[in-house]
Image (cartoon, coloured by chain):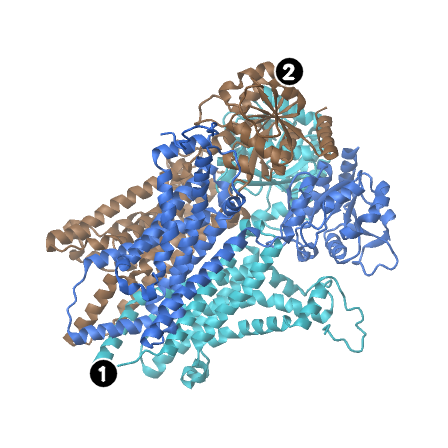
Chain colours: A cyan, B brown, C blue
């Protein structure tokens, strides 16, 4: 029956090149959608409570009572707010076997116990409800697809109803992605409300770390110099200070991106099973590793640019000229120190290689790239190359520090230089990772991850390693 | 009936591992496709007007008359040019219930009133016409999918026919995207003909601006110096001049990317409604904003590289050495000017932050990234962060200019320096945007965008603001 | 019948919000999957050989005999290793009309003559076998989708069965891509085993070239200096030497990316047909052009960074200061040499423009970007702009060399400088490409690519050109 009806729809379209659609609601949404449908060659009839005084509708569209409108078409767009869905229960007989397209959104999440589309299905149990179009912007609904509004997600329990809606969406120029049965409606309704949920924690962390290290270094560098030497070097804030804060935050965040994986392994080793869920905080941390990594990459990118403009800065040129003139006057014949040359070149080399790998990690986290990789490939890059990146960047920072940590003059006001603080987390992560790679630990972990369980917790000697 | 037939096809394939396909036409296309089908394990039979003298066909394929070939298979590939479709009308009875795959393309757009596939459907009304494979290159059709030729688009009115073609395409190694009913055929036929349609206007604009500023600055810098001082500084064209033109064009194009949005808002405020279409030029302008922005990013990228190589240029090293020697000789003890240090560092800092955001905007305009964003997220980035980018870059340019505009020596031949011209459009955009953010203007605009209309144009006091 | 059953499933889910699934096998895979299904609101029943001693199953799941479990559900997940599939043949009557989901993977490719899923279908001919979920990591199966594990590929002969599995996958949070009939199962089973198959050859080549040029230049630069002048300049390895090796390897690999296209054209011209397959080595070479190009881009990226840090290196600052002091002392008044200025600036300019185009090529090879391009656009970029990139980079290298090749002092130990070796392949490719663009050669090639064949190989005068 359903099938036949659907094929008839098609037939009628093909024969007459006219396809009648019904819209319930003459508000902004109904009007925008109707305008677009008319432009795409459809005929549109509006259903309204007050067909004769319902406000303007797009030119070419008719307005009828809800009942008459519903009877004239087989697809009905519900452009009404959820609060007013109630009256549709009375219309249920007229909407029997109709495709009802729920395009509604809510103002915030979890406002209602069930999704709008599921509520609509409950009111009209014999209609075929399809959730669709709600993720588009109002602009795209009125004016057609644009770069960021090309994808229409839909879900519903009737395949034929979804096909009918797919056909309409395709005609309007959108491409359609089927998200399954109506139980996915809540997800679709939550989607337009989301504003970078997974980015919040990493962003807060980044801001927090940036602020902390900014004030820490401001105190140690600018204020300390002013307090002890009465010299104002505040002009160094814009570049020199920024270029200390950015790499520090970047390195810490990169390490924080690999720390939860190490902690998870320790949990599994300690518990002797992989079937128990991790604590909530670890789960949430693991879910935002990609975002942590990408923010770390952004800071690294800024660090690279800030480093590369060093030689064109007025201050640097002034200093170099002054130092050349000073050398000239003292008639010094300073020798090239090959140790310094080795160290400074290695330092830059490590930094460049680390940044290169960093960028590679960033590229493979682009959705279209990571989708094209098998997970074996993805985990090779993100884990093996990831740790290599962390190693390069940490080594780069150690080379930068060199023997600075031995000289007491660097501990101004008894505080360690910023770079030392930045080395804490990455060093811990690298050491823990090395421990996990020890053959006997690695063997235990592999067995646990293949499903093996240490079943006797009451064992007298609960060794966690299979050595 | 249709269903049954389709299932039988499947049955036969599963049982015998042989699946017979028919190709009409033994030209290049038919031959390439046949070769590929044979390699993928299908059996191929060609339909030809002159089965005994039709030229070479791939080894293993049979050649028959059109009628005999059509009867032997249930899927027929039409590898004939549209001009010769006529004879298919007589074959219509034999093609009844067959799946006809139209793979044809035209030499240019709008050559015919209807799409080739729709014409084919009209000639053979009882066949199931599917448009497919036409977007692939000849190379991919013959040799299988490659990186850029993996996607097969198809459309047609019969779901079962599309499934049969999907099955074949998947076997050939392609992945399939269904574009809806046969009415999408025109779009699919236009697709292979397109050559960056949305990039043309932005590219022309970029070339125009680049040429204008190149000659403007060539005159002001090189020719002026030669005319007034008889000094040839033409070697500065390759880097110094390029590095003035690129940032100027980049900034102007970035501003032009945000200008149409501001103009659209003014239109909506003035008209008091969002339901009237914008003028055509504005529509076209708005559609190519992404392209404008990406070109601006490309110019900014070149500007960054040209800036970073400054200190390794021969000319710059010569100048710095000369200036150091001169200072030495004059026995000057120049002081570090902290104002200049502040300004130069701020200037670089603004530039770097602006470029960082620029790159972020570029990344989010990658299709796979923008598809993963809700439009709320996308508009946050492209609009809020976009204006921030424009602000940073404009501020960067103002800091570059500093008090240059006060010194008459910079107005060579009564023309303003290039950077001043580049500041015009961005300043206008930023000021207009600030005006639109004024509470009472913003409130009016929001109401209009939510569907409200100012209905009495005959009103005595047609205030456009709801203050 | 099938249809009805499927609709009943849906009905039951909608009515009771409970959906019973069966899992055969209580090993790690079955346990992980069951846990996830339970979390997503399904009911799970396990089928086991020893229902009473089968080891732990997730809380809330039941364990039954295989027969009882199969009868209770309409979808059965086969979480058993292929070696133990045998017993399913006896269960075939109970599995009739059931959807069997094969999630198995093998330890290496080509272990068995047929895909696991095809073997399963042969054992249970009346069941609807669907291959699915095997490309996910164990982590994703247990914990739900993550960034790189969102896509579920499936294939099978029954559309209804695939729909049922799609529904489950969507509920688990995955998005589904249908890969056609069960004949695609082998491809899906090979996918998780692959580790960058197309990258191997290019990576080996890159390592080989890097190693060769590293030792070549180490000998010419560091060892030669030590041997002849007893001076240790080994500190130059980290940056100076690396920055010679990277651009050389990059340029050669970029040229190797365009060489096979040229060779293929020569083959086609010589054979006078496009219908004969290329030799295997050429086919394989052509398939990894994208990977060659991306590796070349990676090396170019490193070259750019290594170049840009030059002026902040300790060694370079030392040299510049020393040279300024030396000039000062000698009281030289060196003049600005505009030829050197032109050459050095052109050299940098070419490099920057070449790198800019390089990056553009890299961006368009991102899957989501190349999918959005018509192949006319793609071939415009990859071919036209690709050759332009090669030309810029080659020209950049020629400008770097300048008249070095004339001076015998550069031929240390009778070996040519590295940059000369790097120019060989690109020069050959550019010259060959120019020859192919000659009107009469181009015309022949175009005709051949449109399907024309030179049919008389016994011709006395086998001219390959249509001049």
Chain of the residue under the numbered disc 1 shown in the image: A
Q: Residue at x 73, y 45 (%)?
A: C117
Report whether residue B36 is seen.
Answer: yes
Q: Residue furthest front?
A: C460
> What residue is at 42 percent from the left and 34 percent from the top?
C445
> Could you give the CA–CA distance between mark 1 and mark 2, rounded to whole angstroms?
104 Å
Could you say which quadrant of the image residue B342 lies in? bottom left
Dots 1, 2 in contact, CB < 8 A: no
Q: Which residue is mark 1?
A: A330
Along the horizontal axis of the image, is A327 left or right of C118? left
Give x and y (percent) for residue A218: 40, 74
Choose top left, top right, bottom left or bottom right for residue B281.
Answer: top left
Residue B188 is situated, as x and y percent measured from the top left of the image, at 51, 31
In the displayed image of the protein, which residue is found farthest to the bottom? A408
**Residue assigned mark 2:** B93
Q: Nearer the viewer, residue A26 or B235?
A: B235
* Circle 2 residues within 10 Å: few <14, some 14–19, many ≥20: some
How many numbered tags mark residues here? 2
> Residue placed at 41% from the left, 77% from the top?
A219
Can the viewer see residue A110? no
In which chain is the residue bearing label 2?
Answer: B
């Amino acid at each position: 029956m359903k099938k036949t009806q659907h094929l008839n729809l098609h037939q009628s379209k093909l024969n007459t090149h006219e396809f009648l659609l019904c819209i319930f609601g003459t508000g902004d949404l109904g009007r925008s959608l109707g305008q677009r449908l008319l432009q795409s060659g459809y005929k549109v009839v509006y259903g309204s409570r007050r067909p004769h005084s319902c406000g303007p509708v797009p030119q070419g569209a008719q307005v009828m009572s809800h009942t008459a409108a519903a009877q004239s078409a087989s697809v009905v767009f519900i452009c009404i707010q959820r609060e007013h869905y109630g009256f549709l229960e009375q219309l249920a007989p007229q909407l029997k076997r109709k495709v009802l397209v729920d395009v509604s959104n809510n103002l915030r999440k979890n406002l209602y116990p069930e999704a709008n589309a599921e509520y609509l299905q409950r009111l009209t149990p014999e209609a075929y409800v399809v959730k669709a179009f709600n993720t588009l912007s109002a602009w795209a609904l009125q004016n057609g697809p644009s770069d960021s509004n090309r994808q229409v997600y839909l879900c519903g329990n009737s395949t034929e109803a979804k096909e009918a809606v797919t056909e309409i969406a395709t005609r309007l120029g959108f491409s359609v992605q089927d998200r399954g049965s109506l139980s996915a409606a809540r997800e679709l309704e939550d989607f337009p409300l989301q504003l970078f949920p997974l980015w919040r924690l990493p962003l807060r962390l980044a801001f927090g770390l940036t602020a902390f290290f900014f004030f820490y270094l401001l105190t140690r560098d600018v204020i300390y110099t002013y307090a002890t030497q009465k010299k104002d070097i505040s002009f160094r804030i814009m570049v020199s200070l920024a270029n200390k804060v950015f790499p520090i935050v970047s390195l810490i965040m990169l390490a924080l991106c690999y720390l939860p994986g190490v902690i998870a392994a320790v949990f599994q080793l300690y518990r002797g099973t992989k079937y128990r869920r991790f604590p909530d905080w670890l789960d949430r941390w693991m879910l935002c590793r990609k975002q942590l990594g990408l923010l770390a990459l952004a800071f690294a990118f800024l660090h690279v640019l800030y480093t590369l403009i060093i030689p064109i800065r007025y201050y640097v040129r002034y200093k170099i000229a002054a130092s050349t003139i000073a050398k000239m006057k003292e008639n010094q014949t300073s020798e090239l120190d090959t140790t310094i040359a080795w160290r400074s070149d290695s330092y830059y080399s490590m930094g460049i290689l680390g940044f290169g790998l960093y960028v590679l990690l960033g590229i493979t986290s682009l959705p279209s790239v990571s989708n094209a990789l098998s997970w074996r490939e993805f985990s090779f890059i993100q884990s093996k190359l990831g740790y290599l990146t962390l190693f390069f960047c940490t080594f780069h920072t150690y080379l930068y520090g060199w023997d600075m940590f031995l000289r007491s003059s660097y501990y101004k006001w008894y505080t360690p230089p910023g770079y030392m603080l930045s080395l804490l987390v990455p060093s811990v992560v690298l050491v823990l990772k090395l421990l996990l790679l020890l053959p006997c630990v690695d063997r235990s972990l592999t067995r646990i991850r293949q499903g093996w369980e240490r079943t006797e917790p009451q064992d007298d000697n609960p060794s966690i390693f299979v050595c």
